[in-house]
Image: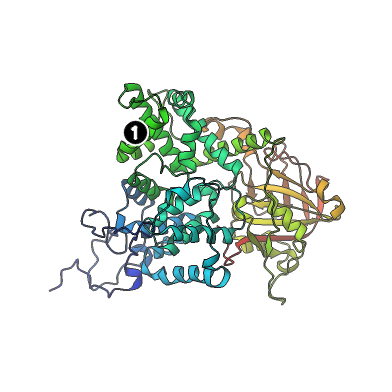
Amino acid sequence: MMDDTEMPERPPTYDSMFINSIDTLQGRQIDQKMNRYPEWNVKPPLFTPFRPKRQRFWQEPVDDDAMYYEEPALLKGMIRKGIPPPLRCAVWMSNVVQSCNPHESLKYAHEYRTLAKVRALDGAYDSLYNNSLKKEDVKPMFFGNTIIEESVAGYKGSEALWRCLFGLHSVLGVVDYAPIVPALTKVLLSHMGESYAFCSIREMAHHSTWYWATSKSEHAAYKQAFLDILAKLHPSTSKTISEHGISDDYANAIFADFFQTILPEEGVLRIMDIYTLEGMKVLFRVGVAFAVLFHRQWKEGACYKSDDCWKTLVDFGKKVNIGTLITKAYGVHGKGVRKRFRFPRRPILQRIIKLEEDRYWRENENGVVEAPSVNPLGLVVPPNDEKHAQPELSQSSAVRCRLAEWLPLALRYTKLDLIFSTNHHGRTLENFYRESKRAKHTIMLIEPLDAPNTIIGCYASQTWHPSSRVYGDGGCFMFRIATDESKSAENSKCWKWQYPESKSFDDDDASVNSKTAILEQYQVGTREYFSMGGNAKGGAGLRLNEDLTRGESNKAAGFENEPLPGEEMFEVGLVEVYQLVREMDGLPIH
């Protein structure tokens, strides 16, 4: 007789089996035994789901969504302990998909752990090389990484690495500088098939602000922001590293080589376990923790064997306890109650990076550093019928070129897809919110009737919706584009949000400060109006009323913009809102 707690087994299907890890790079065998990891399941779900005590075998099985539900804190805790090697391919892939698609259900991301997605991923990758590219044309792409070629010389799967990087370069277009990309691809291929590694790195590229720097200026800002944080949290450690002249080498080992020059392979894999879900912040955390542990041993003389500090640091890294390193990375920094600091939250970290990038451009404005040239954004042309709105304000390639120039690098190789037009959907906020509810990254183009040959607008980093709270982030910006080519260069301008010159890590006081509240009015949506930016007098950088017929534009804190159309109050003509979609497959950017 069947026990009350037993459930009849279902026949195996593609979505009931995890994808196995394989070493594509070196061709080594990965032990697939799971008996050493009792906390992990050998088949979906990843962890044993909760089952109500009163459930009997004759009752309906738990809902699929419940089966795929995982407590985020549980997943984070488990991957920080380390993912079993047989499951690394499955969990790395689903972590990346989950982080890059926060709007999707967990079930959507977890499908990528299983055999259900193998054909789709393999087919898409094969199609890339069968239709768009030729394998015989593949050449090494370094993305600014100067040591990757030497590090994979003689590896069985080195050609797979170059194919992944060449395909990524072809999909994204010209990437200015991203030296960590080859290093990441190398690590991914140690436990993933070629198509899975390519899909993972491509998803990261479309969500690059979560994972890596995409230009020389941003890369320099990441390194300097790390050194700033280290100096704030651990001044003596920072001083030692600086005095011995290894600050730049150490920062490059983190943000260009993904710790591969200073940690053993298992340590790098443990960091990748966390990185796929939590993104670039783990690099900052582990980098600070490693420096602190090294400095402690250095002071005690336990690892002081040579005057060459860098060689000593590398030797220490090969012997460091990875569990201790990860524990330290997620602990509290400093000694004593009054001197303890928690690691900066992600918004604070992004502010510091933005400040350092602005400083980089100021220091190099008269030097040889040049901003990369850009191509116009693509444009999705809808069917010419009554069911679809037709784009008008974005028809000019000059307009789309300006927009591409101002967008973050990760969004420059996208297309504009019209989702709202007052000519088609009418002039109501309700319709605007309804049509925009599924779009995260949007560009709004507005025709001010009082300023001919001018288009004004804004880029919003989060979905427009009515809310009692402010939303958005410092990635938002406002702009004015002169459509008259003779005046385009002098009259077209973009105003990006900038944080004041301060590197405070403790924002508890700032969060309740009225000036900060005004400064961080990125996006405001109500039933009466929507706006971007604000000032102490109650004005906004850009605001449209409820029927989208009148607007106002004032100088906004953080943006420091001029009135966009030239006058503070203006009549509104055509309004169009575009979502950004990927060039490759037309999927919205999230």
Q: Is residue 325 visible in the rendered structure shown here?
A: yes
Q: As drawn, is 107 to the left or to the right of 570?
A: left
Q: As drawn, is 119 to the left or to the right of 323?
A: right
- Please report the residue visible at 42 percent of the width from the left and 69 percent of the height from the top: 117
Viewer-proximal residue, 330 or 440? 330
Count up the numbered dots.
1
The correct choice, above or below, for 114 with respect to 72 in the image is: below
Viewer-proximal residue, 232 or 214? 214
The correct choice, above or below, for 369 with respect to 308 in the image is: below
Q: Amino acid at mark 1?
A: Phe
- Residue hosting label 1: 316
Quadrant including the C terminus: bottom right
The correct choice, above or below, for 476 with respect to 53 in the image is: above
Q: Position of residue 219 (x, y in %)?
A: 56, 42
Q: Position of residue 581 (x, y in %)?
A: 61, 62
- Residue at disc 1, secondary structure: helix
Category of crowding for the residue at label 1, using alpha-carbon neighbours closer than 10 angstroms: few (below 14), some (14–19), many (at least 20): many
Q: Quadrant of residue 67?
A: bottom left
Q: Position of residue 184 (x, y in %)?
A: 45, 51
